[in-house]
Image (tube, rainbow, N blue to C red):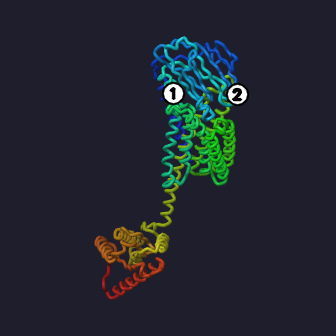
Amino acid sequence: MKFRKNTRFVAILLLAIFFLLIMALLKVIDNSYSYSSSLTTLEDRWTVSLNDDVLKTSSVLHEVNIPVINEGDSLVLTRTIPYISGNSCCLYFFTKHATVDVYVGKDLIYSYGRDIYEKYRECPDRFNCVSLTGSHSGNRLKVVLTGTRRASFSSLSEFVLGSRVDILSYHLLQNSVSIFSGIFLSVLGLILIIISPYMYIYHDRELRLFFSGLTSFLLGLFILGQYGLIDMLINNPHANSVAEYASFVCIPISITGYLFSVFPKRSRPLFQLMFLYNIAFFIVLFILNNHNIIKFSDVTTYIQGSIIIQSIIAIILMYREREHFFTSDDHNTTSDLFFILGLLAFMIFAISDIFVYDYHKYKSNSGNIFLYGSGFTFGALLFVSCLIISYLFYSIYNNNYASMKRQMVDLAYTDPLTGLANRARCEQIMQVISNEHSLYTIFSIDLNKLKVVNDTYGHHEGDRLLMGFSTILTNCFWDANLIGRMGGDEFIVILLDEQASHCTKRIHEFYALLSEWNRKEQVFQYSASYGYAYSYEVPNSSAQEVYMLADSRMYEMKKEHQQNKEMGVPFHA
């Protein structure tokens, strides 16, 4: 028990150190980076209009109370472009479910979303980067944002002016923790998915590693999509949106899959039902999304509600199985404990983010344009880390259990004195070769004079005689399929096919070894009687009957030894 507590403490400590090191590294990178030019945040002097009605003039942008923008609503922002030093720079801002048109004077210099909306009936979120030049300084800047769905957005992002390289660096550094977490989780998930078939086939026959990898990959993909990294890499906002929403819908699939693979039978059917429901829901929604009937973004609220309901059900089921997780006196309890803690933490952080997002979207003046994903990101990292630690503890437990099981099997089928197979094992092997109907030879070998040695020199010398004789058998019949002790002074050797084709040669080697050991032995002398029989000598019979034939031949030799002894003929080997 003390060992288990220590390992749990060490695992938690290592997890905390890992997070601290990552945060420290990202902080160092953030503080050490220097921009090539100054970044200007355009905060004030904005005029904001909604559907031709002026909301604010010459105001600070984040102080403007933006109502919920629905499909077809147009929000227009205008101001004067400040002085731009150098040949070119970029205007950077973020939009949610809105088409974007940017004018300098009367010239349209940037447009986003209209073609995507006409084709897919949705306009994905995007980090916009609009090119401006020095000639635009002092001109009137006009940004038109048009909603493409119900409750598209309810606030505005900051507008930042700077070089393209600095804008990209600014975006990456502002969201460095989340972007790094997304990349880390995605890569880790792919690695776990790739190695999971090997682990399943050759090790634990468990799906938990696969579902751990799938969960990690989906969480990472969702985070990367949420922060627009896929769009930045391939310049395809629609693909970024599909990856973001599809991964979000699939996360319950991987988690419920993991749950039904680790939970006891009593709760497993319910988790299997949830697993199948999530798969069916994703397939239907994916088809509807591809045919532009219902988009992922149209059912975001329903998806969030489904996740919350399933989370509550999972918590109730885990509470019902608390005895399984906390009273089982084995090392696997640690594995289950880390999994439960990670899942609960992730549920808390994810559900908190959902409530915060919806609150700011519909109730708060700050709106939903800002990414409320830090809790989800931290919860995802914590959850996946706990999954990995859980699997490590599970693997350690399984390896220990398998080793203990092998030791028990060895004890059950091994003669404790000689280390050879015992009678139970010998009979088991004979049953196997009988069923296979293969060619084989069975030797029945009897160690002579064991009782005499026991009575004359004591049982310790008798044991030494048995152990020495077992070594002789092992050295002579090194390629045998079985060498066993049937009991007392009776031994058996089984040779298959080619090994059995030179029995006479083997017998000569056997007696040569006996003679060699006798020259070195000072207390007693080794002597043995043998008999062997081929499987084809007893056609359509069991190996037990072949052994009986070999045993009868051994007793004939033993009888011959006894007659020689009565006639005064010495016979050691």
Callout 2 amino acid = Tyr
Contact check, label 2 and label 1, Cβ < 8 Å: no
- In percent of width and height, residue 103 lies at 57, 18
Q: Is residue 338 above or below residue 437?
A: above
Q: Residues within 10 Å of mark 2 (few under 14, many from 20)?
A: some
Q: Is residue 420 shown to the viewer in this render?
A: yes
Residue bearing mark 1: 172
Residue drawn at 53 percent across, 35 percent down:
182
Whichever of labels 2 and 1 marks the residue nearer the N terminus, that label is: 1
558 relative position to 136: left or right: left
Q: Quadrant of residue 418?
A: bottom left
User: Label for residue 362?
Assistant: 2
Quadrant where the C terminus lies?
bottom left
Q: Residues within 10 Å of mark 1 (few under 14, many from 20)?
A: some
Callout 1 amino acid = Leu
Q: Is residue 207 above or below residue 341?
A: below
Residue drawn at 70 percent across, 27 percent down:
362
Q: List the single residue furthest toward the bottom.
A: 567
Residue nearer the viewer, 523 or 493: 493
Residue drawn at 70 percent across, 23 percent down:
67
Q: Is residue 22 shown to the viewer in this render?
A: no
Residue drawn at 46 percent across, 76 percent down:
543
- In percent of width and height, residue 104 lies at 56, 16
Q: Quadrant of residue 529?
A: bottom left
Residue nearer the viewer, 286 or 526: 286
Q: Is residue 350 above or below residue 40?
A: below
